[in-house]
Image (spheres, helix red, strand yellow):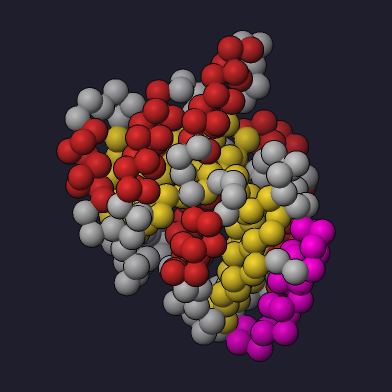
């Protein structure tokens, strides 16, 4: 994720929760990347005192971001329990998980698919990052994902960090958390797609192209009816470029009239780089 940076806690009370060994390790990577003031909670897959942990995790909280690997199935049970309790308390629950590499063991894939369905039925938004897609990275995409493609830990770290920054935007055009919560909570389906892209020459449209081709996405954007987009750039005169980038991402959905929340952080110290992150959701019924 580049040089270390000091990330302060926002006004919106969001907690990051790592479930299982890989989820907890992803949070450790985030701490090392400078997210030191964020509230973290690690839960082992064998925890038995979930009630106490949930009570502590949900205290004075508006949203939880959960990350895990779903290889063994036990993490999905914990995530589902936490998500259902969060809904009872009107807490937004966004989950990002790593899907295991394909293997000769068909049971592992079946277990992972069942885990995804359990989680989807409980959370407000579920993002699945597939380890298999790491093998298909093009040379032009290598640098973008260089800090994430080494293993599931860094992949989840990059993903959950991007979501956090999107939801806590403090730039010139801020993303309102209440709007995000409404958009995700009223979506007919919890399936969500995360895209991350960047341009070293400061081009927002180039970063948008990279984001829509983010190699870890579970599927493409076609059929999405809702987008949350955050654009961060060094230059303060890229507002028009930001709208062009937004329009490019929207075109990939196949629809002209969709719900879009756009946030921008222009003039930030990015070393000339422009970064685009989006979350797409509310897909058509026939786009599972």
Q: Is residue 24 visible?
A: no
User: Quadrant of the rendered structure where residue 195 is?
Assistant: bottom right
User: What are the residue bounds of the magenta stretch?
Assistant: 235-256
Q: Is residue 171 left or right of residue 74?
A: right
| The quarter of the displayed image where residue 262 is located | bottom right
Determine the residue located farthest toward the bottom in the rendered image. Answer: 237
On screen, residue 206 versus residue 19, left or right, reads right
Position of the C terminus, as image quadrant, is top right
Magenta run includes residue 255: yes
Query: Residue shown at 71%/71% (left/top)?
Result: 246
Residue occupying image coordinates x 64% and y 63%: 227
Left or right of 205 on screen, residue 90:
left
Asked where in the image residue 84 lies, by quadrant, the reply is: top left
Q: Position of residue 231 (x, y in %)?
A: 61, 71
x%, y% of residue 116? 54, 31
Q: Residue at x 76, y 76 (%)?
A: 244
Residue 247 visible, this orientation: yes
Q: Is residue 13 magenta-colored?
A: no
Q: Is residue 243 above or below residue 281?
A: below
Which of the pair 95/140 is nearer the observer? 95
Can you give x and y, in whole percent of width and height, for residue 181 in the image? Answer: 46, 62
Residue 214 place in picture, x, y as percent: 69, 50
283 lies left or right of 4: right
What's the residue at 44%, 77% (across, down)?
Answer: 170
Q: Of residues 166 and 48, which is closer to you in this image?
A: 48
């Amino acid at each position: 994720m580049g040089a270390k940076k000091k990330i302060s806690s926002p006004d919106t009370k969001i907690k990051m929760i790592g479930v299982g060994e890989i989820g907890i390790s992803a949070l450790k990577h985030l701490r090392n990347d400078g997210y030191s003031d964020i509230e973290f909670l690690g839960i082992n897959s064998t925890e038995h005192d979930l009630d106490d942990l949930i009570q502590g995790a949900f205290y004075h909280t508006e949203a939880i971001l959960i990350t895990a690997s779903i290889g063994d199935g036990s993490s999905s049970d914990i995530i589902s329990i936490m998500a259902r309790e969060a809904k009872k308390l009107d807490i937004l629950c966004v989950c990002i998980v790593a899907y295991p590499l394909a293997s000769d063991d068909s049971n592992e894939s079946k277990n992972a698919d069942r885990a995804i369905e359990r989680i989807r039925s409980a959370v407000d938004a579920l993002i699945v990052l597939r380890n298999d897609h790491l093998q298909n990275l093009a040379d032009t995409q290598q640098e973008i994902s260089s800090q994430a493609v080494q293993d599931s830990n860094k992949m989840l770290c990059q993903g959950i960090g991007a979501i956090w920054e999107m939801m806590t935007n403090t730039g010139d055009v801020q993303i309102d958390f209440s709007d995000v919560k409404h958009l995700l909570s009223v979506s007919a389906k919890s399936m969500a797609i995360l895209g991350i892209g960047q341009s070293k020459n400061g081009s927002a449209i180039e970063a948008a192209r990279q984001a829509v081709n983010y190699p870890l996405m579970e599927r493409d954007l076609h059929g999405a009816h809702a987008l949350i987009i955050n654009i961060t750039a060094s230059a303060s005169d890229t507002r028009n470029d930001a709208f062009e980038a937004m329009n490019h991402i929207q075109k990939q959905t196949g629809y002209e009239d969709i719900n879009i929340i756009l946030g921008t952080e222009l003039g930030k110290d990015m070393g000339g780089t422009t970064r685009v992150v989006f979350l797409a959701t509310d897909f058509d019924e026939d786009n599972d």
